[in-house]
Structure formats: C-alpha cells, structure tokens
Image (spheres, grey):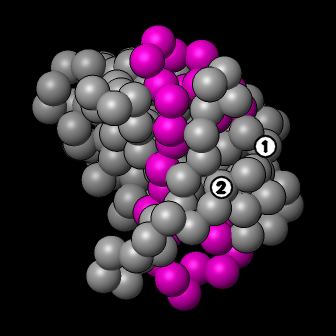
Amino acid sequence: MTLVPVTVALARAIVSGDLSGVDAAPGWPHADTLDALRPVAESGVADGAFLISHEGRVVGDCGWFGPPDPEGTVEIGYGLAPAFRRRGLGTAAVRDLLEWVEAQEGVTRVTARIEATNVASRRLVERLGFTVCGTEGKDVVYERFASST
C-alpha cells in the first residue's frame, strides 16, 4: 500500500471522468472520491490529497480537508473501493496519512467524522488512537491529538 500525492491536473481529470492517468481498481472512484477531489480541482491546490495504491492499482483515496485552523485542528477523510475493505489497507493508509498530517506545521489535533452505522470505519480510527468527542447529525466525531504535541 502506497499513498500517492494527487496533482491538480489529476484531480481535474478524475472529476471530469477521465481515468486515463490511473489504473483504477473495480469500484474506484466512488461517490465520495469525487466530493473529495472536486475542491482540489476547483481551487488548484492539491496539498494533502492522496490516492491509495495497492499492487499498482488505485483502490481508494484519503486526505485532509485543508491546513490547520487557528487552534491547530484538521479533519481527515478516507475511502476504499468495496472489494478492498477489511484487508488492513484502510488502517495502513490512514496510519500513513496521520504520519503526514501530524508532520505538518501547526497541527495539534486531528478529527474524523464517521457515520454512526459505519462500524468498520469507527473501529479503524479507534485502533489508531482516536476517541469520540461528539456527534453531529448521523455522524460520530472522533479526535486524536497529534503525537508531536
């Protein structure tokens, strides 16, 4: 499993439906991928967006929703094609993403919003040291304080 940084050009291509620049696994991209890459394509800023590659194929994506706010908080998101779930790839990808996020200047806290019914994803973040800090609608909000703090 490898995290591959997304370029603006690649984000624009994927959002427009052009997958010629990637070897996409079945089930990728998914609806959340387009929601995640659209801001990159529109803003022209790709910092913090990654494709999840497994055996040379793109099986998912992850990243942050932007640099830290004034309090040092960032939110992350991630997703895998259904056929690649429950193999440890998500945990490995989020672990690597957290390593990158927590190395960025000013980051003190990382959050993730997960639909309450998504038990597998909730367990994933709990394994990586996140704890519940609240709820918002149908989502459970998790937090983890940066290891460098």
**102 relative to 51, above or below:** above
- The residue under label 2 is 130
Residue type for callout 2: Phe
Q: Nearer the viewer, residue 38 or 117?
A: 117
Residue extending furthest left?
42
Which of the pair 8/62 is nearer the observer?
62
From the viewer's side, name the closer residue of 74 and 120: 74
Q: Earlier in the sequence, mark 2 or mark 1?
A: 1
Q: Position of residue 26 (x, y in %)?
A: 61, 60
> Per the image, is 113 magenta?
yes
User: Where's residue 66, x and y in %?
Assistant: 32, 31
Q: Is residue 149 above or below residue 62?
A: above
Image quarter hosting the N terminus: top right
Left or right: residue 9 versus residue 134 is left
Q: CA distance from mark 2 to mark 1?
A: 15 Å
Q: Amino acid at mark 1?
A: Ala
Left/right placement of residue 96 relative to residue 20 reads right
- Check the picture and name the quadrant holding the C terminus: top right
Return the x and y of residue 70 as percentages of the image width and height: 27, 27
Q: Residues within 10 Å of mark 2 (few under 14, many from 20)?
A: some
Q: Quick one: SS at disc 2?
A: loop
Residue under pointer 1: 92
Which residues make up the magenta segment?
Answer: 96-122
Tell me what residue is drawn at x 42 percent, y 45 percent.
75
